[in-house]
Image (tube, grey):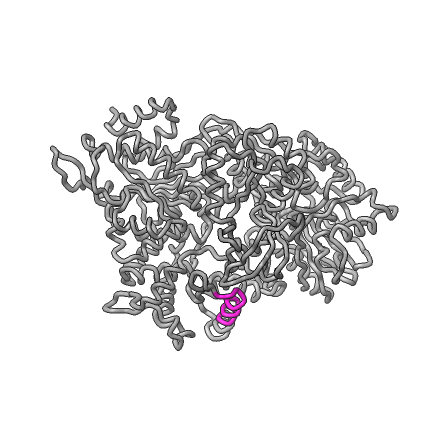
């Protein structure tokens, strides 16, 4: 028999003429039975309502006769999202439901965009539902008397949990939940028109915790990470939508594949075909992988299709918040025909008018592509249409691999982060800033999280010593003595320390940003200090879709005015290109195996036949049991090119490792280049590759860590990781708003700390974390190990070739970064390379077009 709450919700569905999906009914039943867990549902399937409506039904059940009466409920639901942009849409949808049901609730947001006045209003009277981010949750925990804020909390929902899992922001969520769980949850119910405390059982007193996640490869583990180690298994449920979301994927194939670029990552050559799609669509989102790429595409569209001025826009994370909000509102209002965007529009924002998505360049992951494709047809029952635009020839095969992976249901796992001591230090000081904490209680709470389940008490004691006494090394410096101990209570009493800590809460680290403003007033967004530092007054650059003239920098603000120049610099942002995921690379190798066996069923493979035929003619097409190595000589030296097809990060580590193992046979200096498909070793002398291949240890995983540390500058890699760790852990202060410390000064400070710890405190937990992160995230050591084991079992095909093959050429284009200083353009240099290596001295056989920006760095061993 339905409860009063269920009847009200069912009636609401009927009034909306919407059908309640089976998974929504299951979610309702599970929630009302008191369970916590994970909801797995595709984007655009109604997953927000699937959790919010049962929560309302539960409230109506507790107040069946007066649920429409105003009450001082306090905070009942906390909804955590990874993106601030998500909160606006979700808030509006929730508020609309409450208004239609006559429930007099306030739904509010608290994010970095929330004004001081709104934050003050929140303190004065809490809403029933608060939408926030991981950072803002921790800021709330840093406030005095925070337990009162959460004393009536009934449920915490973590939206888009798959995006936070495997990041330090996800660890923030774990730690925040560990504190919320021990605060308890109390509520009241009606009994003969009287209110009384409702405590039917310990089970119902448990704070409910729910995650919402798209499909990933480790959903069960995702739920375990969210709920923690102390959550009773019998109270956990997994609800799966099992909705077959209709997705139509089509690759845009160049008309003449022989003349299409063999290297690059911009893809504007296919702009005419993309604009034909835009013309036929209602509203199109063009996704790029980087902010620079978004700026380039926007500029190209305006230059070549000026009729779209006024009905197109751009959206990425460096644009001013007001500009982003305007774009989102214009999308809702169907005022825009096309928006060029990045991952800033990846997640849950519901833009009904969007019926087409274009992905420029490989998304490098199956789940990421599915997430973006789901932006089109973003409502139950709608068909999602996605077009895939390759930026170079071989990326077409990635398009075929994407289709196959989605068909087979192959999705990437998000491996959780473990023992991130910098995040824990920040959390400890956060609690000390507010109400303080007792060591034994906090240790137990922290141990309940997945991230710190293996934390030892001696390690925890080291962290306590660090925040109170500066540890073994920094005890003489007052700025590191942040926390005081009074009768066993760890507390921050210094107001300056507390203020600086609140300003530093968060785990998102990036290069120092400079705000870009019009000379006449108004903000455009932010750019990194390193880019602004290269500009001189009068220089022209493109940003936010506008041609701008740089005037001056004053107080961390770059002032600009409009420019009539049609050419200018495109800003660049730090951060490498995304590597091919392990799942997508495996399907890519399967597709390549099909090609080597003459299987040509995919349109992408058929289009690439001339390229594959040339590869087979000049060298070899490797089958699944084969590992291809190409060797040739040029005036630059002896080239060795390996093809693991494992992604650029794995290739960076493998290249240095194999170069080191070769150098043990014959001393040599190598230059290294790599892309997602393979890597090149170049030296000025003959390389004894045959002798190296005879040694079974060449691809062995024995002594792998030692060899990696010898082959790479492990200290420098760890030092780079330590910069972020020091920032998160509070070792450096980036400055007050508008008075940020310059990036070079921050780098100098963190480098000095790293050296001091290395010399005087080698067992320092933050230094150990830096080395571990360098191995795990910079080199993907686990994938490297698996790749070496796979290669060791394959047949080695060593081919001596006369000139670069279609597989080799893109790697060699990346290798141009090692050449001497030159005044030639990249296009002139690539054309010269093509002529140099063609069979008859012309560029007819090899006619790739250059990419427009960026050169992969070269490393000397």
Which residues fall within the magenta stretch? Answer: 741-753
Corner quadrant of residue 624? top right
Q: Closest to the observer: 416 or 328?
A: 328
Give the main secondary structure of the magenta stretch.
helix
Q: Nearer the viewer, residue 67 or 6?
A: 67
Q: Which is more toward the observer, 704 or 290?
A: 290
Quadrant assignment, res 766: bottom left
- Where is residue 200 shown, x and y percent of the image? 18, 39
Q: Is residue 83 left or right of residue 122?
A: right
Residue depicted at x 53% and y 35%: 336
Instruction: Specify the farthest residue to the bottom.
Output: 476
Figure disc tally: 0
Q: Residue at x 30, y 32 (%)?
A: 99
Q: Is residue 8 left or right of residue 699?
A: left
Residue 314 within the magenta-colored segment of the rendering: no
User: What is the x, y in percent for residue 261?
Assistant: 72, 43
- Picture residue at 30% right of the left edge, 44% below the top: 232
Where does residue 237 sit, x and y in percent of width and height? 35, 37
Residue drawn at (86%, 46%), measured in percent from left and top? 842
Quarter in which the N terminus is drawn = top left
Relative to 169, 355 lies left or right: right
């Amino acid at each position: 028999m339905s409860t009063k709450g269920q009847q009200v919700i069912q009636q609401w569905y009927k009034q909306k003429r919407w059908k309640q999906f089976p998974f929504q009914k299951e979610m309702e039943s599970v929630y009302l039975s008191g369970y916590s867990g994970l909801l797995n549902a595709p984007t655009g399937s109604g997953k927000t309502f699937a959790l919010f409506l049962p929560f309302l039904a539960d409230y109506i059940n507790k107040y069946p006769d007066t649920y429409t009466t105003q009450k001082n409920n306090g905070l009942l639901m906390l909804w955590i999202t990874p993106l601030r942009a998500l909160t606006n849409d979700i808030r509006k949808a929730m508020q609309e439901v409450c208004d239609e049901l006559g429930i007099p609730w306030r739904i509010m947001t608290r994010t970095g965009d929330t004004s001081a006045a709104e934050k003050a209003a929140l303190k004065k009277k809490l809403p029933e539902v608060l939408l926030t981010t991981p950072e803002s949750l921790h800021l709330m925990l840093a406030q005095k008397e925070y337990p009162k804020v959460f004393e009536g909390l009934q449920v915490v929902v973590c939206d888009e949990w798959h995006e936070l899992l495997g990041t330090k922001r996800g660890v923030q969520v774990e730690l925040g939940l560990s504190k919320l769980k021990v605060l308890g949850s109390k509520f009241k119910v009606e009994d003969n028109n009287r209110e009384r405390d409702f405590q039917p059982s310990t089970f119902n007193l448990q704070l409910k915790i729910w995650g919402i996640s798209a499909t990933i490869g480790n959903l069960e583990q995702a739920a375990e990470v969210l709920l923690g180690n102390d959550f009773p298994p019998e109270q956990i449920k997994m609800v799966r939508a099992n909705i077959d979301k209709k997705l139509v994927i089509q690759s845009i194939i160049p008309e003449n594949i022989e003349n299409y670029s063999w290297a690059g990552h911009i893809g504007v050559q296919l702009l005419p075909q993309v604009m034909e799609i835009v013309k036929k669509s209602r509203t199109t989102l063009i996704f790029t992988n980087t902010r620079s790429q978004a700026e380039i595409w926007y500029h190209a569209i305006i230059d070549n299709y000026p009729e779209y001025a006024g009905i197109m826009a751009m959206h990425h994370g460096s644009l001013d918040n007001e500009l982003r909000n305007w774009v989102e509102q214009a999308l809702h209002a169907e005022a825009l025909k096309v928006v060029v965007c990045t991952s800033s529009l990846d997640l849950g924002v519901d833009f009904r008018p969007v019926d087409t998505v274009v992905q420029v360049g490989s998304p490098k992951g199956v789940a990421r592509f599915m997430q973006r494709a789901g932006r089109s047809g973003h409502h139950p029952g709608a068909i999602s249409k996605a077009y895939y635009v390759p930026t170079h020839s071989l990326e077409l095969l990635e398009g075929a691999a994407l289709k196959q992976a989605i068909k087979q249901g192959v999705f990437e796992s998000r491996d959780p982060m473990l023992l991130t001591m910098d995040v824990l230090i920040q959390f400890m000081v956060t609690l000390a800033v507010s109400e303080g904490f007792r060591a034994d209680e906090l240790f137990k709470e922290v141990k309940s999280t997945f991230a710190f389940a293996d934390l030892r008490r001696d390690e925890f004691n080291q962290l306590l010593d660090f925040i109170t006494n500066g540890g073994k090394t920094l005890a003489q410096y007052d700025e590191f003595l942040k926390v005081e101990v009074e009768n066993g209570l760890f507390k921050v009493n210094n107001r300056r320390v507390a203020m600086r800590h609140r300003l530093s809460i968060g785990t998102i680290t990036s290069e120092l940003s400079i705000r870009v403003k019009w000379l006449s007033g108004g903000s455009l967004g932010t750019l990194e200090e390193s880019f602004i530092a290269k500009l001189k007054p009068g220089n022209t650059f493109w940003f936010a879709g506008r041609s701008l003239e740089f005037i001056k920098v004053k107080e961390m603000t770059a002032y600009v005015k409009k420019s009539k120049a049609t050419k200018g610099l495109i800003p660049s942002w730090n951060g490498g290109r995304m590597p091919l995921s392990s799942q997508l690379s495996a399907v890519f190798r399967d597709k390549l195996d099909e090609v080597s066996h003459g299987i040509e069923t995919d349109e992408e493979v058929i289009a690439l036949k001339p390229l594959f035929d040339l590869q087979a003619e000049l060298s070899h097409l490797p089958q699944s049991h084969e590992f291809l190595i190409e060797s040739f000589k040029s005036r630059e030296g002896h080239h060795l090119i390996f093809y693991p097809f494992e992604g650029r990060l794995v290739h960076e580590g493998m290249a240095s490792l194999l170069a080191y193992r070769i150098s043990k046979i014959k001393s040599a200096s190598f230059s290294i280049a790599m892309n997602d498909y393979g890597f090149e070793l170049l030296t000025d002398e003959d390389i004894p590759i045959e002798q190296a291949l005879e040694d079974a240890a060449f691809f062995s995983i024995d002594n792998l860590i030692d060899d990696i540390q010898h082959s790479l500058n492990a200290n420098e890699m760890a030092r780079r990781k330590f910069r972020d760790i020091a920032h998160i852990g509070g070792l450096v202060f980036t400055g007050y708003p508008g008075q940020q410390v310059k990036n070079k000064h921050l780098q100098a400070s963190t480098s000095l700390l790293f050296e001091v710890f290395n010399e005087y405190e080698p067992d320092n937990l933050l230094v150990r974390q830096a080395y571990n992160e360098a191995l795990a995230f910079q080199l993907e050591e686990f994938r490297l190990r698996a790749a070496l084991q796979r290669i060791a079992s394959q047949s080695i095909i060593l081919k001596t070739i006369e000139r670069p093959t279609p597989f080799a050429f893109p790697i060699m284009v990346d290798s141009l970064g090692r050449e001497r200083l030159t005044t030639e353009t990249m296009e002139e240099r690539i054309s010269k390379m093509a002529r140099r290596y063609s069979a008859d001295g012309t560029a007819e056989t090899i006619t790739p077009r250059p990419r427009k920006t960026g050169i992969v760095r070269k490393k000397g061993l």
